[in-house]
Amino acid sequence: MSTTTVAHHDEHADHPTGIMRWLTTTNHKDIGTMYLTFSLIMFLVGGCMILGIRAELFKPGLQLMNPDFFNQLIGVHALIMIFAALMPAATGFANWMIPLQIGAPDMALPRLNNWGFWLLPPSAILLTLPFTLALFGIGDGALATGWTFYPPLSVQGGIGVDFAIFAVHLLGISSVLGSINIIVTLFNMRAPGMTLMKMPLFAWGWLITAFLLIATIPVLAGAVTMLLTDRHFGTHFFDAAGGGDPIMFQHLFWFFGHPEVYILLLPVWGFIPQILQTFSRKPVYGYKAQVYSFWAIGALAVVVWAHHFFTAGLPVPALLYFMYSTMAISLPLAVLFFCWIKTMWKGSMSFETPMLFTVGWIILFGIGGLTGLVLADVAADAQYHNSYFVVAHFHYTLFAGGIMGIMAGVYYWLPKMTGHMYNEKLGKTHFWLTAISFNMTFIPQFFLGLAGMPRRIPDYALQFAEFNMISSISAFVLGLSQLLFVYIIITCIRGGKKATDQVWEGAEGLEWTLSSPPPYHSFAEQPVIK
Amino acid sequence: MVCSFHVYTMEIKANDNDTSPDQQRKLANKKLGFKLLWIVAGSIAFSIALVPLYNVLCTLTGLNGKTKTTASEISNTKVDESRWVTVQFTSNVMPGLGWNFHPKQSSIRLHPGQIQTVLFEAKNITSQVVAGQAVPSVSPGVASIYFKKIECFCFVRQELQPGETKLMPLRFFVSPDLPSDVSEMTLSYAFFSADKQ
Ligand code: HEM
Ligand SMILES: [Cu+2]
């Protein structure tokens, strides 16, 4: 993965070469590149796992795998996509772009930054190793509880659970280190004159995400540690026989888990307005309103967790409270949607690939938010909980809202990072393939959920057959389309039309004042913002 | 961004004791980094504190249906003959315990304050001596703090010889303070193996 980003300038960049360069680098662009590369690889790994699932669900009955392996694939798929694909992609962009956007020479704590990244590969290995071990007869495979680790299943599970717990510890330390670094960078390293309220929205989104991460990741770490001691050291935190309570795990898990969904999206909400601004050739509408909405969502995120287990037998006042507070989140979200649309309103828009992804993103993420409102209704959720409706809901938010947003960012910044334009025609093809096959994969799952098909079950009743078949075929188209994405990125790194400094006609902001690709060390002298 | 940027390159400062600004910033960065670690420490502490907090909250309010694990005092509660309450009984044997276990009667009707005894039957169907622990829970959860056990086989571990059958008594009453909208409640026992380790 040696790249062109740094190869042909900066003679005085005296860094080691080859693998040592990547192992020891403290350069924010190198680290950003590593995060993004790692994320892309894990995106493909997680994708292969879920294609195994869709192949099994292609028709009723058990064809390809036993239920236990099915459960392992589902759980590890989710953990990989959330922690090893989506989060590292956002962190990769943060490393690359935050210093450039705020006029800083590098991240504030470069050595910590290197550590933050190098914890990721070992944790990915820990997550997937039990699959391999099982081939050699050691243990019974990976975590089979789903990504949520619910006891008592997780207390009774095999070594896969222990591996996943340690992987979560490492991933957690990595995110906490990364977040501390980002907060310090944003507080201490801004160019003179760049006040907090002049920061690009991407920086704002990340600031809130970073605070949410350092506040909630330790709670997840605490919860899985209690799980570990329940498993091996005779404690009874979640064991009803010993006076514990399995429901308490759900409280602890979702106290982290719900903020996590906003952690994944806030960085995306940050750069989407920048893309809209560029391709509408108009300033961002409602900058302040968006910043305050970020705050509001960050604050609400930590007080709504129990909507993930409305059916666990909560008392009625608690149900009402969690229902209304969850619904309240859609208010600041609606403000954001309004600002995004208003930014485009009467702009002179053009639809290059990043803009296509962004406009598609607004619509699809909108569907994700609206179906979330349906689930937030306690009475409706009694029927939809644990059904495919929930699966479709969170893929509209996480695949469309998360991954497709990240893809918009990739196309937007790739010319800046590599110095080359990507192939626009292929980019647009990639968008249409992705958008159509994504909808074809998940719209049927809404209907399956409404009809009562439960999630995380390898077999199903005959009346669900047609929708599952459509969903499976589309999922394979969706998966294969991503190979095109990989091809576009690789060819763009290798060469292509030279990108100008500004890259996009309407692009504004400090990163576009630098050369494309930017020099290895940028803003050694900080710009002054007026 | 709302504002457009006007970028100027700062004049290179001609001062030679230049260790200061750069080093100062590094120091400031480290300081802030360590300060943020306090937030991390705080939330670790919070996650640990949540366990006792959760349990206290649940015992006070009975939110999770847990009843007290020790005997209640028989205070001179008046029997409220104007009201009837139905208590239903269900039972589960959790995986890992080779017992049969069920209530001798599926429900009972009684007045609040009236003391009653019901029997549960447990049979060890294995060929070993096996110990179990019963864990009660009451639903609706709001009723659980009004369900008062005077004597219960769930207060201690129970041990059964191979093939042994045992009748296990529960003496209880329902407190007359029971909210007036509750006229029915279910007491569920889950019997867990208590042999592990
Ligand atoms: C207004 C916005 C939203 C509302 C009201 C909402 C509401 C809900 C509710 C009530 C559930 C639980 C459903 C159940 O299990 O029965 C749920 C599940 C979920 N939501 Fe949302 N949601 C919203 C936005 C989002 C966003 C933005 C994301 C992600 C970025 C997201 C990700 C998820 C995930 C991952 C799950 C399922 C977790 C699991 O059980 O594995 N949601 N949502
Ligand atoms: Cu949630």
Image (tube, coloured by chain):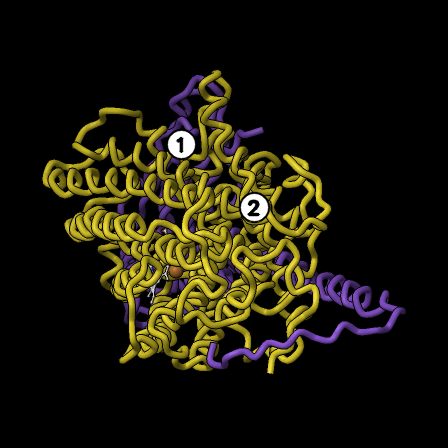
Q: Which of A182/A26 is in front?
A: A26
Position of A153 relative to A273 (above/below)? above
- Displayed quadrant of residue A408: bottom left
- At label 2, which amino acid type do we have? Leu
Horizontal relation, residue A244 to residue B26: left or right: left
- Chain of the residue that carries numbered disc 1 in the rendered image: B
Q: Are marks 1 and 2 on the same chain?
A: no
Q: Looking at the picture, which amino acid does disc 1 mark?
A: Pro
Q: Is residue A276 visible?
A: yes
Asked if disc 2 is less than 8 Å from ligand 1, the answer is no
Q: Which chain gets the purple colouring?
A: B
Quadrant of ligand 2 in image: bottom left
> Who is closer to the viewer here, A193 or A126?
A193
Q: Element at badge 1?
A: loop
| The chain in yellow | A
Q: At 74% from the left edge and 75% from the top edge, which residue is drawn? A: B11
Q: Is residue A279 left or right of residue A510?
A: left
User: Badge 2, how many Cα within 10 Å: few under 14, some, many 20+?
Assistant: many
The answer to whether mark 1 is within 8 Å of ligand 1 is no
In the rendered view, would you say A462 is above or below A439? above
Question: Can you give x and y, in whole percent of width and height, for residue B191 in the image?
Answer: 42, 38
Chain letter belonging to callout 2: A
> From the viewer's perspective, is the residue at label 1 or at label 2 nearer?
2
Residue sitting at x 62%, y 65%: A183
Label annotation for residue A171: 2
Judge whether A352 appears above or below B3 on screen: above
For mark 1, does the 10 Å Cα neighbourhood hold few (<14), some (14 to 19), or many (20 or more) residues? Answer: few
Task: Point out which mark residue B95 bears.
Answer: 1
Kindly identify the residue that appears in the image at 67 percent across and 62 percent down: A105
Q: CA distance from mark 1 to mark 2?
A: 33 Å
**Can residue B154 be seen here?**
no
**Residue A159, percent across and down?**
51, 29
